[in-house]
Image (cartoon, helix red, strand yellow):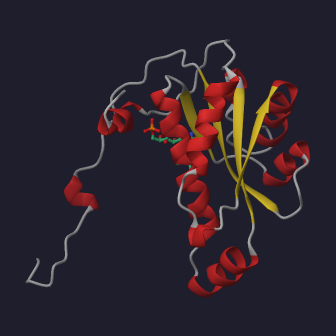
Amino acid sequence: MPRFMDLVKGRRSIRSYQDRAIPADLVNKCVRAALYAPTACNRQRVRIIIASGEVKDNLVSGALGAVPVRNSWASQAPVMAVFAVDRDILVHRIASGLKKIQYDFMDVGIAGEHFVLQATELGLGTCWIGWFKQSRAEEILDIPGNWNIYAMITLGYPASEPGKKKIIPESDAVIFRNGEGDE
Ligand SMILES: Cc1cc2nc3c(=O)[nH]c(=O)nc-3n(C[C@H](O)[C@H](O)[C@H](O)COP(=O)(O)O)c2cc1C
């Protein structure tokens, strides 16, 4: 089993996939990892739609194809995991409104990344997709009215090796405060 930092470094956005189905139990493992994610007030309102076959094709042509950045490479992935939130009145409407923090975005982000890291451990490739038309996706998937779709993640066996990722220097991203005269 890869060590955590190897897993984190090994995860890259994959945009080309083998023409190979994913065993259902592997998809289930990714889903379960997502369901263990923390959620605001532990409401657990993240919903995942696993789209494959012609529904996935319709998503790619209809929902991804309806925006300026089309992500047409996504047609190669055998599965598209669609992340939605069944919006909770207390947390996702009232608390979010008061605090000006979008808890539903955060819930999806954390759950999605659990999904992605589990997929990476299983040798599967993923790519987050933020460019799609929400209303078309909701129509195609015929989801309940209170669910809002915030992200999609492609899933499949990678057809290319991702390179090493270069990250910004830590000094650009982190500041320390300990009350003892930091600069
Ligand atoms: C919220 C979010 C939305 C994204 N949307 C897209 C997208 O629509 N199309 C795409 O090709 N990549 C998308 N990406 C992937 C980023 O481009 C990618 O994470 C970034 O370039 C860093 O590369 P890496 O994932 O290989 O580390 C998205 C990533 C995130 C987190």
Q: Residue lying furthest left in this view?
A: 181
In this rendering, the answer to whether 75 lies above or below 167 is above
The residue at 65%/34% (across/down) is 28
In the picture, measured across the screen, residue 106 lies left or right of residue 63, that is left
* Left or right, residue 119 beside residue 62: left
Q: Quadrant of the C terminus?
A: bottom left
Residue 128: x percent and y percent?
58, 41
Does residue 61 lie above or below 105 as drawn? above
**Residue 159 position by quadrant:** top right
> Considering depth in this image, is 104 or 170 the residue closer to the camera?
104
Name the residue rendered at 91%, 48% in the picture: 142
Q: Is residue 114 visible?
A: yes
Count of numbered marks: 0
Q: Nearer the viewer, residue 161 or 2?
A: 2
In this rendering, position of residue 59 left or right of residue 79:
right
Say above or below: 138 vs 52: below
**In the figure, 43 relative to 5: above or below?**
below
Q: Quadrant of residue 149?
A: bottom right
Q: Position of residue 97 (x, y in %)?
A: 66, 83
Q: Residue 139 or 168: which is nearer the viewer? A: 139
Residue 102 seen anywhere in this rendered image of the structure: no
Q: Residue at x 19, y 77 (%)?
A: 177
With 116 as the anchor, is 168 left or right in this view? left
x then y, percent, for residue 79? 71, 29
